[in-house]
Amino acid sequence: MYTTPEQFIAATKSNLEAQFASLTALNKKAFEGLEQLVSLNVNAAKATIEEGTAAAKQLVAAKDAQEFFSLTAAQAQPSAEKALAYGRHLASITSATQQEFTKAVEAHIAETNAKVVSLIDEVTKNAPAGSEQAVTALKSVVGNINAGYEQLSKTTKQAVQTLEDNLTKATQQFTQAAEKATAKKK
């Protein structure tokens, strides 16, 4: 199939175009995730400013120290809940973006791998006699690269899962602590 330089150039061009399309898709996914994070942060900042202003007005209007501390305790629970909701939303956006990114990368690598294997098979069909060792070495290199990628992919997925588990545990502990603190103040 790849017997002429023109055919090889066409195959290379096709592969580069596919890589460019994949990179464009990855960039789009990354920007979508970034857009969600910016939106989350802008909304959180707006809400914090509005709620902070309202809370400050309430505290300034307190008639005595007991009312001041009562208002402070009442404001602690909603603030803790909002911080937890923010953390969950942030984790959700990050996780979803990472999953989409991983799917796109895996699909691209599988497609590229299939093309490389096909190219190697075509080249080996037309390889001159005595080049069997070089062909075997090339196939071995491709196999090792694939094995390395699979190990990296597994390790990355385990790291992401550990991070998500730790975030869930921290959120649960923070929620329990906030609930206990609020219950003591009531």
Image (tube, helix red, strand yellow):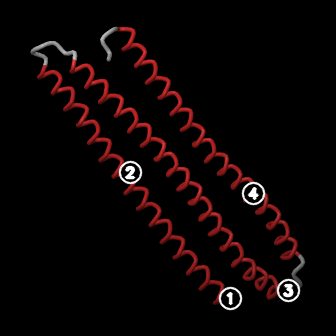
Q: Is residue 163 left or right of residue 59?
A: left
The residue labelled by disc 4 is 43
**Residue 99 pos. (x, y %):** 50, 52
Q: Amino acid at mark 4?
A: Asn
Which residue has dot 3 on it? 64
Q: Looking at the image, do the residues carrying marks 2 and 1 touch, with CB atoms under 8 Å apart?
A: no
Which mark, residue 156?
Answer: 2
**Image x and y of residue 16, in percent:** 46, 23
| 119 sits to left or right of 54 | left
Give residue 50's position: percent from left, percent from top. 83, 63
Q: Disc 1 designates what residue? A: 185
Choose mark 3 or mark 1, whichever is in front: 1
Viewer-nearest of discs 2 and 4: 2
Secondary element under disc 2, as helix, strand or loop, is helix
Decide which of tag 1 and tag 4 comes sooner along the chain: 4
Identify which residue, 32 or 139, lies in the foreground: 139
Q: Residue 181 lies in what quarter of the image?
A: bottom right
Q: In the figure, residue 74 lies in which quadrant? A: bottom right
